[in-house]
Image (cartoon, helix red, strand yellow):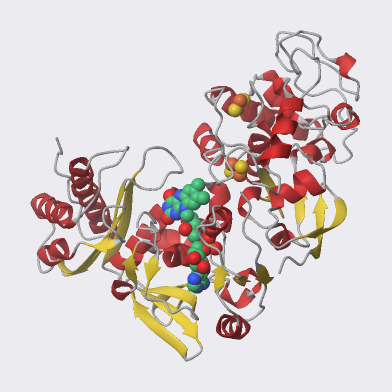
Amino acid sequence: MTDEREITLTVNGTEHTIEVEPRRLLVHAIREDLDMTGTHIGCDTGNCGACTVLKDGEPIKSCLMFAAQADGAEILTVEGMEDLPEADDIHPLQEGFREEHGLQCGYCTPGMLMAGKALLDEHPDPDEETIRDAISGNLCRCTGYQNIVRSIEYAADELENRAAADGGAVATDGTADAEPAASPEGGHATPEFGGDADTFCGREDCCGGPDGADPFDRDALLDDAGDGDGTGDADGRDDADAGADATDRGDTK
Amino acid sequence: MKSAPFEHHEPDTVDEAVSLLESLDDPTILAGGQSLVPMLRFRLANPDVVVDINGIDSLDYLREEDGSLRLGALARHADVEDSDLIDGEYGSFADAAPLVADPQIRNRGTVVGSVAQADPKGDWGSILLAHEGEVIATGPDGDRAIPADEFFLLPYDTTLGEQELITEIRVPAPGPNEGSAYHKLKRKTGDYAMAGVGARLVFDDGVIESAGIGMTAVDITNARATDAEEHLEGERPSPDLFAKAGELAAEQSNPESDEHGGADYKERMVDVLAQRALSDAAERAGTVTVERRVTQ
Ligand SMILES: Cc1cc2nc3c(=O)[nH]c(=O)nc-3n(C[C@H](O)[C@H](O)[C@H](O)COP(=O)(O)OP(=O)(O)OC[C@H]3O[C@@H](n4cnc5c(N)ncnc54)[C@H](O)[C@@H]3O)c2cc1C
Ligand code: FES
Ligand code: FES
């Protein structure tokens, strides 16, 4: 009855074959079997949206689907954002969240980014109401949403500017357009990203918090073994998160 | 919490699914999973076998055929939301779809699964009742059509047999003088209804020939407001007529007080929502525009 089954998930372009029990949730397969802990678990009941991923391009809550049901599917998680064709080191949405302060603790951010990505894929130029509708399945307990809306608007503008600068085409290799068409109007110089946490803006309360880790810098975070909880690092309490997850989500519960 | 272990079957055809339901012990059907997965997780449901119907492509449709709108068991809430056919002709469905849960849940959850779930707070049951629709089930003895009126028994309990699969729900396609609408009051975006009312009106020469009203979250099941329906039939629409219908619907409703509102308040909301749904339905039927009575 507890037979495991072999399934194939293509996550962020990489194919993974794993063995899962039928009762294994997609979110647990992503976090625990594939060690991609950028996808968060907030409520476990379908209410909070922290576990949002794109399955075959559509946003879904990965705590409401069994992994076996995603056999053969293409999954996009927050870790894959920076490798998307429209990303330039980091994805315009991630840039938007940084520039517009679209996050505080960062717990909801991976889900917000995925909901925002799905929205912009369908409506490149959304109005505020459309944005609010698109993130209506994602709860944020910190920001009050205003800055999240602005962050997504920022990304929409950025994508449009880049498309205009490229003569209508978005860069597909992720290397073109090294200089963003519209430089962000933040209160500090645009930090450069290159997998090294030292290259941040340097401000204590900005770009990743007191430990200086960049919430969007996947390489640095993945390199940091034993922690790896990408976006969750924004709260600077990543290890505590990881510990809580390990006990909370284990077989014993 | 994890679900208890279960066997996962993925039939490709309805026949296969029905024979699994017939031959296996203690099976449960899995559609969008947006209600069932949490129930499995909380161990409110502990089936030995899960029959996952997501691979039965023949159930993935939303179309008009032989005078009915038919939604196959794999038509998702988002399919209704995105459908031009729905937008043009089925006001109540078009109103309700974007009000069900949130975008992620609408991408997975199915209309049929929602009807099967028989949660009194579910939106689709009220619409099925307002349209006097049917639930089409297939079981070991073949197909049968269950009128919406005879489907809902208790919260989470229906007249569906244990070995039956719902293949579709259907409602009569609207004639030229028909209009429908759905109004829902919720605490915040994405929530279940505190109260909801679906209405459908069919006119004959300016007179209401037939009326259907379904109510959400104000009784132990989705419920019809039959007194209000009777009051409307044979009459010409007017603010007073709709006000009386709202009052009758509220009287027939049976809400419970909870943390979101008292029973009196919810009854009052049934009245208001019914008037709104009726006046939208009348306007969409193209017959008249009925001013809404000012509500205090
Ligand atoms: C956070 C949240 C908010 C929600 N808000 C709303 C809301 O505002 N309004 C609303 O109406 N709903 C709401 N829902 C419920 C949602 O609409 C579900 O999609 C729906 O209730 C069940 O549909 P499903 O396809 O997901 O079915 P499942 O969860 O797969 O199944 C539900 C039940 O129906 C049975 N079933 C499913 N399909 C069939 C079939 N073809 N034949 C026989 N039995 C079948 C299953 O065995 C199970 O018992 C919400 C859910 C969540 C998690
Ligand atoms: S963890 Fe999936 S919606 Fe909250
Ligand atoms: S929950 Fe959204 S930033 Fe903290």
Q: How many marks?
A: 0
Left or right of A140 on screen, residue A81: right
The answer to whether one can see residue B104 in this image is yes
Taking depth in this image into account, of A128 and A53 the one nearest to the observer is A53
Q: Residue furthest bottom?
A: B141
Taking depth in this image into account, of A40 and B170 the one nearest to the observer is A40
Residue at (81% x, 30% y) in the render = A90
Q: Residue furthest front?
A: A252
Q: Position of residue B147 (x, y in %)?
A: 32, 77
The answer to whether one can see residue B76 in this image is no
Left or right of A139 on screen, residue B153: left
Q: Position of residue B51 (x, y in %)?
A: 61, 72
Q: Position of residue B150 (x, y in %)?
A: 30, 75
Residue at (48% x, 76% y) in the render = B166
Residue at (44% x, 63% y) in the render = B117
* Above or below B24: residue A64: above
* Above or below A224: residue B178: below
Q: Position of residue A127 (x, y in %)?
A: 54, 34
Residue at (76% x, 67% y) in the render = A3
Taking depth in this image into account, of B148 and B25 the one nearest to the observer is B25
Taking depth in this image into account, of B74 and A133 the one nearest to the observer is B74
Q: Quadrant of residue B151?
A: bottom left
* Above or below B63: residue B144: below
Ligand 3 quadrant? top right
Q: Quadrant of the N terminus of chain A?
A: bottom right
